[in-house]
Structure formats: C-alpha cells, structure tokens
Image (cartoon, grey):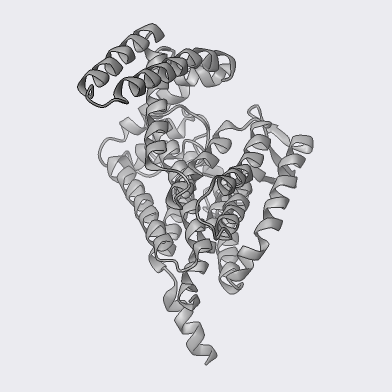
Amino acid sequence: MYNNTRKTFFNSLDWISIAIWLGLCIFGWFNIRAAVYDPAHASLVSLSTNYGKQFLYIIVCILIASAIMIIDSKFYNYVSPFLYGITLILLVLVLIVGRNVGGNQAWISIGSFRLQPSEFAKLGSCLLLARYLSSNTRGPNVKTLFFGCLILLVPITLIMLQPDTGSALTFFSLILVFYREGYVSSQLLVFSFLCIVLFVLTLVFSQWYIIGTLALLCALGAYLFRRNRKAFSSAAFLFIASSAFVLCVDYAYNHILQEHQRNRIDVILGKIDDPRGQGYNLNQSKIAIGSGQLFGKGYLQGTQTKYNFVPEQSTDFIFCTVGEEWGFVGAMFVVLLFLGLLIRITLIAERQRSSFARIYGYGVASIFFFHFFINIGMTIGIVPVIGIPLPFLSYGGSSLLSFTILLFILLKLDANRKGIV
C-alpha cells in the first residue's frame, strides 16, 4: 500500500517543470562561470569562485526541493503566517544590521553567505495572500481586497526603506492574482496600462501638447457618441482626470523618483545620450548581446564578458553572457524555456481543486513573469535598469533558493491535488 501511494505521488509530479527548472539552473551555472571565469580556478566546482558557490547552491536547492516533497502539503497553508512574520522581522533587521551594497542595505551577512530577506518576503507574501484570499467565502469584496493589498504593502514599505525599488516593484505583479480571483476588473487593468502609456508620453512630449491631444480625442468621442446622454459628461470627466494625471507626472518624476532612477528612464527614452556615463550599463549590455549574432562567439570566448565591460554580469546582467557567447539561438533557447515554465505554472494553477493552491500558483506565475520580463527587458533596453535577478540563471544563493522553494511548493500542492475533494 505504501509503495503504491509513493508510486502514485511520483507519477503525479510535473516532471516537465522540474526538467525546465534543472535545465535553467545548469545553464545558469555554466554562464556564471563564463561571466567571472578565472583560469587559476578552472574547475566548475571551485568554492573560491562564484560559479563554485553557485554549484553548492544548486545542490542545496535539490536537497530543499526533495524535503518540500516529503512534507505534507497542508503544512504550507498552516505555516504561511509564521513564514510571513519571519520575513518581516528579517526585513526590519536588515535595516539595522544589513550590509550596504551599491547603495542598497538589503543583505545580512552570515559568514561568507549574504542573505537577502526581500527574496524570501515574496515567498511569505504569496503563501499568506493565498491563505487569506482562499479563506474568503463571501466572494470578491472591498474589505478582502483591502486586507489582501495590506499583506503586500507592509513588505513593500520595508523594502523601499532599504531602498530596493526593483524588489519592491515585484510585489505589484501580484495584481494578476487579484484579477484572476475577480477582485480586479479587466477595465481596471486596461486603465492601469493606459496610465503607464500616458506617463511615458508625458515624459517624451510637452505636457501641454498631451493635454491638447486629450482634449481633441475627448471632443471627438463626445461627438461620435452624441446620441448617448452620458457621452458628454463621460468625455468631460475623462479629460479632467487625464489632464490632472498629466500635470502630476512632472511633480512625481522630479520629486518622488531618485536621480539615478530618472537618469535610467531618460536613457531608455533617448533624452540622455551618455554611453560612458548614465547609459554605460545599457550600452555595454546591448553591445554584448548584439555581438553574439546568430550562434554566438562560443563558450568562454565573449570579449565583453572576458574583459568585464558589463557590470554585474553574473547577476542582473547574466543574459548578456547568454547573448554574447550563445548568440540569438542561445538567447531564444532561454526565452522559450522560461515561456514553457510560465505556461506550465499557469496550467498547473488552473487545474487545482484547492483555491489556496490556485491562488498560490498564480502568485508564483506573476513573480516569475515579472522577473523574466523586466530582467531581459532591461538588458536589451526596453525597460529601465532596476536591478532584479533572472530566475535560476543569475548568481546568488538567496534568489536561487527563494525561486526554487516558490516553484516546488506549487509542484507539491499539484502532486496532491487529486486527494482534494
């Protein structure tokens, strides 16, 4: 009986997701070696190098993933408040005793290991949000939405105090969870997207030109739908609200965003052309990726990589190494692996019988998608550089551990879904 149960559980595991995870980890390990290669320590497992340490992190992740599969799946729902509380304590602690790296006080040194609490706060928040929303039996309502947002707002605030804008922005991707569960309408998502577009347009063009264009569009809309009594009032309200938003953009941009954040946005928008200064990281990143052409320069043959032209190339800019040494083919291989993993996670979330598992699954998908899109987007120059890792490829124990735990808890919940009535 015991053997049959174990065999059933073994067969229920989503081995495709596990294979993609392992493939990304190994490919990332090889590319970290290429990014910081030291001929004096050529071995892939030399613990005096980052790639040797990454190998150790991968082994630890395999052990932790195995442990996750042994633990009862109900444990993760039960433990979510405690894990969330522990991550909040760590986020407070890092502000007191944390190590400052690159202007961010985001790491706690534990011997040679640097713990980044913000990475694990994503895990704690996903679990607690899933527990809270799944416990709601009255359907979507304002009260539940408010406290659900509050669960995310607390870690966001603590992370912004470090300040680590990139990690804080990741939590906003969980709006997709609220959308899937019916707390956020499609209209609100479209409205949010249009606000982002309007924000960018206001930075590129004169705000008075934007307001004038909005006036013409609203007037045209009111004329086309003039038979509708509410058309004029709706158009007027839309114009007033949009104009107020445009006028607030300038203040927010100059008084809320920090100087380096404004500079990164200006580089993307082409308002600053400073390849040796503010635009150095992006310029070198695009050179590295572009120089790889179709099939790349070959493993350990990347000149941009070998001579350290790209800063943080083993962490935030690891995709540059992929593009330079493996070319367009290698870069597309990584993109397709990630897309495959995201599709698998979404399918897994949809087939859950438990609302807790479904909500958690969409949380995992949201966080992975945000990291995937923003990290690759910033290396090719379509989004500002905000400094977040590429899951499973970037060097770092905290990120690799947190992403692995996020994924394997979902796989554990999925493997036991048939036992839920």
Nearest the camera: 322 or 384?
384
Question: Is any part of residue 125 visible from this angle?
Answer: yes
**Residue shown at 58% from the left, 31% from the top:** 165
Task: Tell whether 199 sits left or right of 296.
Answer: right
**Residue shown at 39% from the left, 32% from the top:** 191
Task: Tell whether 293 sits left or right of 108.
Answer: left
Total number of numbered labels? 0
Q: In this view, does 368 lie above or below 214?
A: below
Q: Quadrant of residue 199?
A: top left
Question: Is any part of residue 48 visible from this angle?
Answer: no
Q: Position of residue 306 (x, y in %)?
A: 45, 34
Q: Quadrant of residue 131?
A: bottom right
Q: Where is residue 399 in the image (x, y as percent from the top left)?
A: 57, 47
Nearest the camera: 345 or 149?
149
Instruction: Tell which residue pokes out farthest to the bottom in this image.
Output: 1
Q: Position of residue 312 (x, y in %)?
A: 53, 33
**Residue shown at 68% from the left, 32% from the top:** 162
Q: Where is residue 280 in the image (x, y as percent from the top left)?
A: 46, 20
**Residue shown at 58% from the left, 49% from the top:** 144
Q: In this view, does 43 lie above or below 92?
A: below
Q: Is residue 120 above or below residue 65?
A: above
Nearest the camera: 210 or 290?
210
